[in-house]
Image (cartoon, coloured by chain):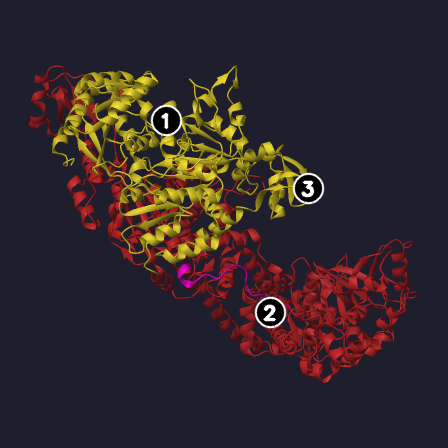
Chain colours: A red, B yellow
Amino acid sequence: MLDARLRRQGASPSRGGPAPSRGDGRPTADHHDVRIVVRMSTFTDQLRARTDDELVTLLRLRPDLGSPSPATLASLAVRATSRMSLERALAAVDAAVLQALEAVVALAAEDPPTRDGVLTAVAGPAVAAASVAGPAPAGSTVTDGTDDDDPPDPTASAAADRALVGRALDDAVARALVWADDSGRLHPSPGLAEVLGPYPAGLAAPAATPTRPGVPPPPADVHALLAEAPAGARAVLEALTWGPPVGIAPEPSTAAGRTVAWLVRRGALRATDARHVVLPRTVALALRGGRTHPEVAREPMPSVGRRWPASLVGAESAAAAERAVRLVGALVDAWGRTPPAVLRAGGLGVRDLRRLAQRLEVDEDEAAFVAELAAAAGLVVDDGGDPPAFVPTDLVDGWAARSLPERWAALATAWRDTMRTPWLVGTRDDRGGVRSALDPELHRRWAPRVRRTVLEVLASAPEGLGPGAGGVLDVLRWRAPRSVPPEAVVRGLLTEAARLGVTGAGALSPAGRALLTDDPAAPAAALTADLPETVDELVLQADLTGIVPGRPSPRLEALLARTATVESRGGALTVRFTPESLRVGLDAGVTADDLLGELATVSRGHVPQPLEYLVRDAARRHGRLRAGAALAYLRADDPALLAGLPDDPRFASLGLVLLAPTVLAASVPPAELVEALRERGLAPVLEGPDGSVVHAQAAPLRVRVRPSRAQVQPASDDEHSALARATALVPRLRRAEEAVPQLAGDLPPLEPASPEAGPPTAPAAGAPRPDDPEARTAAPVHVRAVAPVPDRADVPDGTADPALALLLLREAADERTPVWVELVGARGELDRRLLVPVRVDGGRLRAVDPAREAELTVAVHRIASVHRARPAAQHAPDPAPEAAPEGAQ
Amino acid sequence: MTDGPLIVQSDKTLLLEVDHDLADACRRAIAPFAELERAPEHVHTYRLTPLGLWNARAAGHDAEQVIDTLLLYSRYPVPHALLVDVAETMSRYGRLQLVSDPVHGLVLHALDRAVLAEVMRSKRTAGLFGARLDETDVVVHASERGHLKQVLVKLGWPAEDLAGYVDGEHHDIALETDGWSLRPYQQQAIDGFFHGGSGVVVLPCGAGKTLVGAGAMARSSTTTLILVTNTVSARQWRDELVARTTLTEDEIGEYSGSRKEIRPVTIATYQVLTTKRKGVYSHLELLDARDWGLIVYDEVHLLPAPVFRMTADLQARRRLGLTATLVREDGREDEVFSLIGPKRFDAPWKDIESQGYIAPALCTEVRLTLPDHERMTYATAEPEDKYRLAATAGGKNAVVDRIVRRHAGEQTLVIGQYLDQLHELAEHLDAPLITGETTVRERQRLFGAFRTGELSTLVVSKVANFSIDLPEASVAIQVSGSFGSRQEEAQRLGRIMRPKGDGRTAHFYAVVARDTVDQEFAAHRQRFLAEQGYSYTIVDAEDLDQAPDPA
């Protein structure tokens, strides 16, 4: 049955041609020939062939390509194939695209696949083919690997899988990770294979020289082989089938060891050294039934947890939002009076954090978050004073005057865009120190991006469902498998979102969803809709408690703030009246009658007698002690001495006040007082240095915001400007192409300007290396001599530009085509050789020199120029290039 | 959003609006799992605690029911964290069960292997377990049944005690219901207790807790050990049992400092049990003297720590706790839960008052302004003397005198803490004084005279705090107390709450010195009663005569 499947797969049109030739073990030389003849275009060509719209899309999908702006499409191509850019591009793609890429890389290593070939390799054969194939066994084996858990309608889901892979493939092409040649065959972009690692899709590299003596070729029919294999052989192969393909060989003396040896002798395994065996790619593919992946990576639905009704999510989010705003307000209030000091290394001391937590009645984690939130919104800053302290800014007054939803929106958008990572507070850094809140070290450039990503995952969950950190990570692992944030980060972000009311009951709230839109007014509006109606009623009870059965109106809240302490919050607000809480109101100058009058207007019934008694008793006891400010005092045992002084017009400027018959207070410093009295003929003496009372109720401190620190660019703006930049860039690139029509690829963009100046925006494609004078003088001459063919001018066949040279080398490595490479020797002489590049990585070129039958590795900075060898060159080297180097040398 | 009577707060308190149409239904629905914390006039506060939720589980309620009730009556959306927490907490009860195995004896059986593993790893359970039988069962030393339950509550995995009880020695007891019958709530309390096996019945002072005890004894019909707070209380239990049940005086023994009788029904005082001689509890044998079928703990909130330890060894016997309040000043509510049993019945005082079973009471705090010289003395006194100075302020005598005259013709108790002050007061009022020094015989004579109306005023020390049945007393004047004890205040109010023959309102006065710690302690003491719905009117001593008419 398996045999049948293999044959059918092998006979499918996409894999028709090369399949038999692989099996018969003929040398690959003619193989190369075929491919070189077939090859009609290169990566750069297809990039050039893209429409403007496609280029814009590319620049938008891979923003690093457009910044700084490349000068030409060729340098764009260079950048797109650099390891760094490819890593970034891979970090941004989802699991399905990654599968498609792996499939293309894996298949193209032997024979560039067609689109359909990739779809079949990843998702299985087209449904029509499967159903046409008819007999149940074949059909069932095909669906075996893909749809174990979804038996009801395998054909529909198989079609959906193929569609998914198709979309992934389109995406890969749009991102210039894969390109199609004129015949529709797909190639991985140069350099991609190296970035993806040694075993794409868990397949071993194709056998480079299958004719090595003593190594048997892989069996033509592995299933037939297995039928006669010793016991355990199948298990050995199956363990390696889906990769990684390398296994450790058991001791040869054991039964397992003998089985492995048996398989090695028949070519079903290949021994790489004494300890390791590798499953050859053809065997693996045969065992896999021609597939590169057992099943298509479908986007997981975040389905963990319970779905809560929208009303609950809204209510919890509103409650949390209100709490967050209240806590930030309390922090600003507290720090406005006593600003905490800034640690020497920056940040808030542990003791100050603990004090803040006590003041806010929250734990230290949350206190740290509140402090970070206030700082992110620009409400508090390090004032840079001496000593420095965290002080509220003048933004506070404007913020505090706004409505609750607006205040929240200001905090929430600041949180959305901040690079701060408050969840790290309290953890230890590399040197073992505890990270403090507001520590400047807690900046992370990726924070806003990850935060947005997490919110987007929440937004994609069904309404009312909180997927939790696990669920979010499941989705993120699919969306960007190569850049999954650590679980602690996701957890931290979700905790923050819950504290801020961006989520309610773990699910994204309408207000949180509004944060993802571009409309700056949306968050406040969404929160307004979720906030419960305010209540203007207070239930007063004889046990000196009061209850607001709902959200208190601002007026009620203000009244309670000066008369009562809060006991519990939630759907309602419960408060307790104590002598201490009433004192706040009395301190503000409210009389007992006023207070009782106010309470009576909001109270449902009468003010209970014990409460009324308490208020009056508190008022009676209030102010029995008096304190005041004086700069000096004057005392005398004889009241008569002091009696006239306050009324004496000559002393009016001293601000004398009679406190008691024998004590006067003055509003000038003692020295001044004494001086003035002496001038009038009196003889006072100064009494001790600590006789003055300095009592200055300092106004809450405010400093100006330094715009550079508080200004936060909303991420949505970035998005827009990125698109605008990309759209503007493409025409410039086109113009650059037209400006140097013939030699765009051949010539480094020296352009008319002096080489040293170079275009500042394209450092990669710029001036030749200053430390390499030969290269600078030799290269241009050489290039002009070598590339005289006018009809192929737009194909870069040779270059001395280092960046373009790398591109050429990568392309050549990909295709295993030979190129002419000029190497700079130790004494500066040029050495020209025909090489087949194998790999360009980490600043080194590994290549095979067919003429000397040797492999060599050279540092790329020693390469002066690279020229594509003509297709025919392999058999009959073109005389022109042969001659030119002699002339140059 | 519904328009329910309940508001659920994020700190797990529930606010019930009592004037709401659905308030009664809601109260009944939440009573099994929420503890009533405060019951002032408009909004009652209940609290969800692990103990409360486990009590509910013990009574057969499940988390689904609790959550449905909250959602049904709540006015605003209930915080989901709270719902999750309720479900999680309730699911912890009963994952471990104490069962009686025919072969191995007492066995801890786990419905969840992980929980058993966690519990067995804990240091606290070291030495409590015997052999491990299999993955879900482990033998428990029979002597450690109570200790293990205590530990498991502390670990957050309360065990369901299904090991049953020894039957005890049979003894015929029946209620003699000639001309009276159990009140409905008393019957409910007895049923609730028996259904649950062991546990605590919470009833206000004066609501007839003794009868609940008698009813339980009749239902059990076994030999019974009754533990009470003091000798006077022991005699009252005996008299009540003789009057209300078929038991005769000969069948009831007293085991106290003065007498050591062991009879089918034995009443012992906490004090004699906790008396140590040469460092050992010399009366422990009482607990094993007979094969008791029921043990009754009167005033369980006062149970001294040594008795807890002894009780830990009595887990195989049925235990009934009686109290007016589960508030313990020492915070050992969880030990009551694990060792005596879960709360089996609870009724708010105001409910029973409204049914007419206890007298309505008016509470008044009279504030006395100290004269200048006393304020000066107070201001300069050492902190440890301040309360005594303020509580025994001389001006209080005159105030008490005025209150007594105001209620002339009513049976009045004057209660205080400090003997000097009480002697002075007794002299001032020309009334007899009962203190701890008064002989039991003299006490009983004076209480008897007071009951018959021969005496109208009695000055008593804290000996009268508990369990003294003075049905006709309708005025109590408290001049000093033991600092801020909430349960003492409740007990003292309880002295005057027996329903009066003519349905009179009882009056409770607390005389307090203004602007002193006396006032602060008074405020603390009143909290329990205020939370039970008794509102204190505060009057100045000078305005006493203009205070609302006492009638």
Residue A131 is labelled as none
Which of the 4 quarters of the picture holds residue A106? bottom right
CA–CA distance between discs 1 and 3? 48 Å
Residue B490 part of the magenta-drawn span: no
Residue type at mark 2 is Leu
Q: Quadrant of the C terminus of chain B?
A: top left
Helix, strand or loop for disc 2: helix
Which of the 4 quarters of the picture holds residue B179? top left
- Mark closer to the observer (3, 2): 3
- Label 2 marks a residue whose chain is A
Residue type at mark 3 is Leu
- Mark 1 lies on residue: B233
Q: Which residues are magenta?
A: A297-312
Question: Can the viewer see residue A271 in this picture?
Answer: yes
Residue at coordinates 24% horizontally, 18% vertically from top-left?
Answer: B432
10 Å neighbourhood of mark 1: few (<14), some, or many (≥20)? many
Helix, strand or loop for disc 1: helix
Which one is nearer the viewer's eye here, A676 or A328?
Answer: A328
- Give the main secondary structure, helix, strand or loop, of the magenta stretch: loop
How far across and down, in percent of the image, does residue B71 sit?
A: 40, 57
CA–CA distance between discs 2 and 1? 99 Å
B438 in relation to A154, above or below: above
Residue A304 part of the magenta-drawn span: yes
Residue type at mark 1 is Ser
- Mark closer to the observer (1, 3): 1
Q: Are marks 3 and 2 on the same chain?
A: no
A410 in relation to A750, above or below: above
Residue B133 is labelled as 3
- Mark 2 lies on residue: A76
**Which of pointers 1 and 3 lies earlier in the amino acid sequence?**
3
How far across and down, in percent of the image, does residue A649 sit?
A: 7, 28
